């Protein structure tokens, strides 16, 4: 068994794979953070969607008034969905990119810019910053993922 | 070609990778099941969102009344979105974790608890169970993913 | 370091992995395209959700009227969410499937049918085609992912 373990560990010994693992874990944790922020706003704004979540506020009509939408909750939820739409392609394409043998410096450039752009995007969405702050940070992350996809398709092309 | 096949097959020969593959496939299939449950409730409750989906119920006003939201449909859809928000990080971080060389027993503990927690979460959401049933099952899955991310970052750290 | 690079590059040298990488990149890029189509409809239909996005249309009430939902925008968004719900399982299960040592011809059959079905699904959703066009294209992609999951579970089973 030790031999098999070693074989699989080889992959994470590769510096590009290590850099990908680090950045992928960071952006996925950042995405997970959106759940906590949503929960925070739901509780402080008292704005819930499931009747069973308001049971602790009393019964009947007194609890029903907390089944409502709140602009701050909806804003965090939109940021969370935008993360799903953009971080999922990054993780999928980024892993294939890391396996396509890019230069370490080029790969780091891609990973670092994407991670920075998505962190900026979250601040731009939640503060919120005036446009085109959010739009630009979104576009930068999008372009990085597109660039990695181009490298994957050029290296792996087998339709 | 046989040599290349063998090389890639080595990865799935690793017991941690096999355990990850099994649990990842199970939770992804569980997530896919939500689509079928949504379709089931849309058809039995006659609650659709696309006009072309109600064409078989007749034309004009008689079909239009089925373009509506239904509490049961919306509940399944929220469960589905919650799966996306939590199972995506598990699959991404879990794969990197499996490649970071954890002990088999520790890895199995993580994978089994996550899979169990997400299955419980679905039951808690759909029945629905009173809180904190759903909240706790969500938190357990969240904590497992966080613990795996910590191991990935500790092993792979390369920013 | 060159040795390590070579080791990780071996994976992408495998023809099944190359075929997976090509199809996964294509469907993920297709999913990313939905963001651009959403933006296109939001701008041409002037239907936004974030107040800061309408600032360029003037202040106060004159901008507020563009904070509205539009049927075309909502349709693209539903197509985008459906992509997330179906392409995420394909990418996750498909990668594990590619590592489970399938025949190249069987793997290509799975990948090609899934990619074709999801492209058809997008056209069926956006045109829109009458049912069961969209339903069938969805079901075909679903069945392909299910078939791959069966192979993964049969090969890797380790609960």
Image: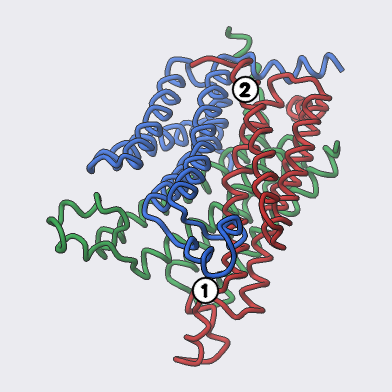
Chain colours: A blue, B red, C green
- According to the picture, the residue beneath numbered tag 1 turns out to be B69
Q: Is residue A111 above or below residue C79?
A: above
Residue lying furthest top: C1
> Which badge, 1 or 2, is on the more N-terminal residue?
1
Task: Give me the chain letter of mark 1.
Answer: B
In the rendered image, the quadrant that contains the N terminus of chain A is top right
As rendered, which of A18 and A148 lies closer to the eye?
Answer: A18
Q: Residue at x 57, y 24 (%)?
A: A21
Q: Residues within 10 Å of mark 2 (few under 14, many from 20)?
A: some
The total number of labels drawn is 2
In percent of width and height, residue B76 lies at 63, 62
- Res A142 → quadrant: top left
The answer, for residue B18, to whether it is visible in the render is yes
In percent of width and height, residue A45 lies at 43, 51
Which circle marks residue B92 in the picture? Answer: none
Callout 2 secondary element: helix
In the rendered image, the quadrant that contains the C terminus of chain A is top right
In percent of width and height, residue B111 lies at 76, 35
Q: Is residue A100 above or below residue B29?
A: above
- According to the picture, the residue beneath numbered tag 2 turns out to be B150
Callout 1 secondary element: loop
Q: Residue at x 73, y 39 (%)?
A: B114
As rendered, which of B86 and A1 lies closer to the eye?
Answer: B86
Q: Is residue C79 left or right of residue C112?
A: left
Same chain for mark 1 and mark 2? The answer is: yes
What's the distance in space between the residues labelled 1 and 2, CA to CA?
41 Å
Task: Give me the chain letter of mark 2.
Answer: B
């Amino acid at each position: 068994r030790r031999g098999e373990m070693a074989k699989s560990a080889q992959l994470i010994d590769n510096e590009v794979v290590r850099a990908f693992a680090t950045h992928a874990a960071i952006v996925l944790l950042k995405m997970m953070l959106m759940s906590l922020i949503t929960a925070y706003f739901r509780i402080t704004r008292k704005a819930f969607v499931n009747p069973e979540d308001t049971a602790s506020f009393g019964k009947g009509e007194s609890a029903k008034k907390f089944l409502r939408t709140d602009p701050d909750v909806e804003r965090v939820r939109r940021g969370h969905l935008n993360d799903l739409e953009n971080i999922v392609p990054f993780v999928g394409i980024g892993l294939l990119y890391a396996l396509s043998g890019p230069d370490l410096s080029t790969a780091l450039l891609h990973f670092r810019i994407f991670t920075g752009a998505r962190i900026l995007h979250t601040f731009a969405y939640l503060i919120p910053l005036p446009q085109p702050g959010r739009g630009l940070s979104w576009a930068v992350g999008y372009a990085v993922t597109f660039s990695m996809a181009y490298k994957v398709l050029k290296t792996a092309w087998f339709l």
